[in-house]
Image (cartoon, coloured by chain):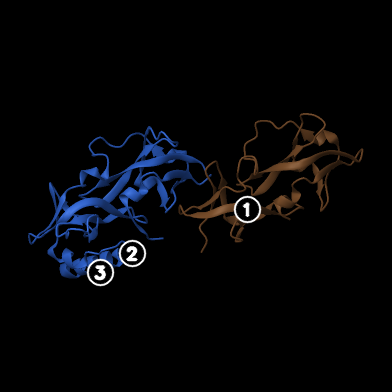
Chain colours: A blue, B brown
Amino acid sequence: MRALVRGSDLVGLPVVTLAGDDIAEVRDVVYDPAEGQVIGFTLNKRGRLARRLGRFLAQDRVSAVGANAVMVADETALTEDPPHDRDPGSGNVLADKVLTDSGVLIGTVTDVVVDTESGTVVGYEVEPVDEPAGRHGRRSYVPLPDAGAISGETLIVPASTVDYVASDLAGFAEAVDRFRDLLRGDGS
Amino acid sequence: MRFSDVIKRPVIDLATAADIGRVDDAVVDPVARRVIGFRLKKTPDDARWLAWDQITALGPDALTAATAAAVTVREDAPGRLLRADGVIGGRVLTDQGMELGALADFELDPATGLVVGLLLADGTMIEASALLGIGRHATVIRHQG
């Protein structure tokens, strides 16, 4: 079941075994911008205090990500802490600027958009640079190539990206597909 | 037969024809998809657990057992009480991570104790074969369709 969600929508979701027990909740989404892939999730203990649980849930141990829970087979899905060479959190791209290879600044990243079926990051939620006054808080959705974006201090995306920027998540899945089809066509 | 219809049903000792308790709760094994046993109330002593294999019959008006000794003290048996542990009224979650609302009732086969279906609060009946787990967060079922 394909669904696109913002990374921040996943924060706080319970991690539930197929036996029906909640064993953790999502603290943050760990994302590799170079690969365009969610690596996994850092975790909090369940409960009001939401203290950090020193375990990690790797993407390949997740059986499904739904609107109401992250499902795993059993407790063994949780492993030791994430690899230390990764920056924990999608925070590593937040506030980065998105620039096309033709030199057009699209905006600054406010969130990642995750395809929950594949665990890939298919785009970024951005605050557009051409934000008119009085429309504060409005966001746009920028598709990413299959391969992800070239990232440093700025995320570089193809110039054609600007034609596929969506104003809401509902239409974004289709925009991503069309954008990626276009890129594949260019390459052949 | 619905689990809710079994609640408060008397348990009769067939040896003495005495009323030895009332059904108060039950535990379902989610893997075997059957009732493991019933917790009783109004028993003569602290023994309140009636295992399924100690039941002679689950009839329309009463449960019968061969002897009052069928009712025992429940050991630290695994499994959750459907009422006391909030399985009934608790959330139902698919293996895709989608909530389907609250669990209203279990449909049981009175001859075997097997779960036939799970009734959701919105009236949907889910086939028992979809049942994956009954945990402290949710009853988990395989995604339908």
Are dots 3 and 1 on a single chain? no
Helix, strand or loop at mark 1: strand
Residue type at numbered disc 3? Arg
Which residue does the image show at 40% across and 47% down from the upper left? A62
Which residue corresponds to mark 1? B104
Q: Quadrant of residue A101?
A: bottom left
Eye-nearest disc, 3 or 2: 2
Which residue corresponds to mark 3? A178
- The foreground one among B56 and A11 is A11
Q: In the rendered view, would you say A133 is above or below A11?
A: below
Q: Chain of mark 1?
A: B
Q: Which mark is residue A21?
A: none
Q: Earlier in the sequence, mark 3 or mark 2?
A: 2
Residue type at numbered disc 2? Ala
Q: The N terminus of chain A lies in which quarter of the figure? A: bottom left
Q: Which mark is residue A170?
A: 2
Coordinates of residue A46 in the picture (x, y in percent): 44, 37
Q: Chain of mark 2?
A: A
Coordinates of residue A167 in the picture (x, y in percent): 26, 63
Q: Kindly report the distance in space between the C-alpha atoms of the residues bearing marks 3 and 2.
A: 14 Å
Helix, strand or loop at mark 3: helix
Which residue does the image show at 54% across and 41% down from the upper left? B136
Q: Answer yes or no: do the residues labelled 3 and 1 have beta carbons within 8 Å?
A: no
- For mark 2, does the 10 Å Cα neighbourhood hold few (<14), some (14 to 19), or many (20 or more) residues? few
